[in-house]
Amino acid sequence: MRSLMSCYHFPWLLLLAHTSQALLHASETPQRLTLSNDRLTASVNKSTGAIDALSLDGQDLLGTPSSSNPAVGPYLDCYCIPGGNGAYTPGSMDARYQLLTASDNPSWVGIVMSEIYPPTGQLFEQYWFLRDEETGLHTFSRLAYHNSSTRFVRNLSEFRTLFRPNTRLWTHLSTNEKTFAPLPDHNPATGDLEDAVKVQDATWYLRNRSDPYVQGMSDYFTKYTFSDSWRDHRVHGLFGSNGTTAATFGAWFVMNTRDTYFGGPLHSDLTVDGFVYNYLVSTHHGDQTPNITDGFDRTFGPGYYYFNSGPGDASLQALRSDALRYADPDWSRDFYDEIAEFVPGYVPSSGRGSWRGKIELPQGSTRPVAVLSQSGVDFQDNVANTSAYQYWADIDTTTGSVSISHAKPGLYRLTVYADGIFGQYEQDDILISAGQETTTVAAWREEAAGQEIWRIGTPDKSSGEYRHGDQLDPTHPLHPEEYRIYWAIYDYVDDFPEGVRFEIGKSDEVRDWNYVHWSVFGGSGNSIRRQPHYGDGNVNNWTILFDVSGDQLQRKREATFTVQLAGAKTAAGNTDTFNASQLYSDLPYTVVVNGHALEPWIIPYYQSSSCAVRSAVSCYNLAHKFVFDASLLTVGKNALVLRLPFNGTDYESAILSPSVYVQYDALRLEVR
């Protein structure tokens, strides 16, 4: 197996990145525009709007086009036009191009691709900038729509840039410091299906037992294995060697800014699967998407595609660490200010403000974070205002101090949450002004509804603490978290032959509480248990057994059962579309206390996520409080049933599990 684990010190990377005397060139012919310095060359094909020639130190980074892979990038791509699935690649319909240079003695050069899509008048723009001493491309992507007579086009379901090579140069992929693997010898994600058997949409079983990916990572491959949440994400990419020049190479996307994305720190998305993605917008994992309506005009970025090299014995981790240095948002701020006049919508430093907070945190808070996002809505829904930006920063648990710099002026909602704490703190109308610092002092009190009787799980906006969640796979030497691997290998029927019966004080969350609560298990999308298993009510019904003492119930009138979900899949899947033909577009979730059914919680179609089947334990988070008469509880033994509809399913056009399901973050019972 190709080694990933060696540790290598790399002063040579600093040398290569910063001491070259780079000579910048920008040129144009009738067919293409080219940017280069003495190490990196990138050329945009005018007929496609994509970079189709890219080299570092003479090494071709893209490879040769094929029928399934054009070997291009970085380039702009979207699901954004009316009709069909909305797929479109801007640049092939009479696009206009512009070469940009700083001066007669430039320190940077750039290319702008601009295209108006004729049927709708949507404007697409892609920007690439190269600096004199760097081996990377700074990118911006813009979509604008102005048409008062046809005010709505569709939702922007995907907007992304891709580095899409077709070469054996790349041998490994890396999502973050923990998740990395060899690429399959025949990668189905890039169209090479030689060793692959499809088991689910975008998921394959790899038959070659000697494949380094199979030996090191998993028998199954899907791009969703390598997704990540944006909160702490910094860099992802590809690593490899040409095998002839005793050199290694890296191709990375560095997320040096995050303010123009949507969904806040809980947004999770694809990163790398043989291609290197920058997903600016998507519906993956229930992520919300904006509508393209009259007046829509948003420039996303900057982001940085970085390419590096090292000696033949350099490790993936070494080249990744080099790329990670550029994730600092202050690194290129002066440069972005310099080019702001050429990038519509980019706000320079002179037009930004800052925010400082002093937050009194509840006792027991860990990993607290402060989020500034669109005022008036949950940060997961901040697509409602397409001119609003988002920011977040960790809070010092000792002092409660937190700060955010270079924020776009506007009104923001402050949201504070932390692991270990139920609920979150919210404060609207935080005003950020250009050239000024805004200060907020706040005291966050954990939500409470009386005396706590018990809790299950840790409130951390994830179902990872439960069985088959964050636990490491013991059967492969790279030990991925179990949730990242094809869900069907964790057979619910074998794991829980009697269903989930969780006894407070005796049962163990890691062993006795599954990371997914299915309505039905097996059938479509499950290549292992091909027939649906409905059980006798022990799949869709989970039971919690607990004792309550007389002292706990004395003079108590009201009980509150809090359910926090890390994700819920209704019949709407990821579409956020209500379909009247689907019984469970809005999903009823019922709690039964000692035989008494409480009023169902109706989980709406627009808060649905395709989560577990897409290798995730944290998607669109939601919560509900079931408040009921405390007299439903009895001294001694009690039973609380969590109920999904029996055989609750939807129609799936792709090979996916039709089951509705929920994934628990944490649960708590209180009385007062």
Image (spheres, rainbow, N blue to C red):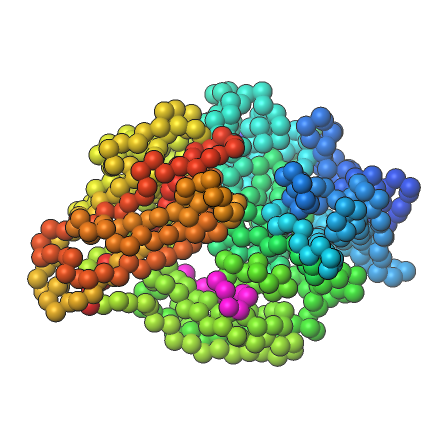
Q: Is residue 480 among the parts visible in the rendering?
A: no
Residue 27 in the image, given as x and y percentages of width and height: 88, 47
Q: Quadrant of residue 643?
A: top left
> How many numbered markers are drawn?
0
Residue for point 83% across, 39% down: 47
Q: Is residue 537 among the parts visible in the rendering?
A: yes
Q: Is residue 614 above or below residue 199?
A: below
User: Residue 440 vs residue 469: left or right?
Assistant: right
Residue for point 84% across, 60% down: 102
Residue for point 27% across, 32% down: 535
- From the viewer's side, name the closer residue of 494 and 620: 620
Residue for point 17% across, 62% down: 630
Residue 173 in the image, given as x and y percentages of width and height: 57, 38
Residue 359 in the image, given as x and y percentages of width and height: 42, 73
- From the viewer's side, name the closer residue of 30 and 92: 92
Is 473 magenta? The answer is no
Quadrant location of the C terminus?
Answer: bottom left
Q: Is residue 469 above or below residue 324?
A: above
Q: Is residue 293 above or below residue 1?
A: below
User: Residue 395 vs residue 236: left or right?
Assistant: left
Residue 412 in the image, given as x and y percentages of width and height: 54, 70
Instruction: Decide whether the magenta segment is chiefly helix, strand or loop.
Output: strand
Is 376 magenta? The answer is yes
Q: Is residue 454 above or below residue 363?
A: above
- From the viewer's side, name the closer residue of 61 and 669: 669
- Farthest front residue in view: 580
User: Residue 96 vs residue 481: left or right?
Assistant: right
Span of residues in magenta: 366-378
User: Residue 394 vs residue 184: left or right?
Assistant: left
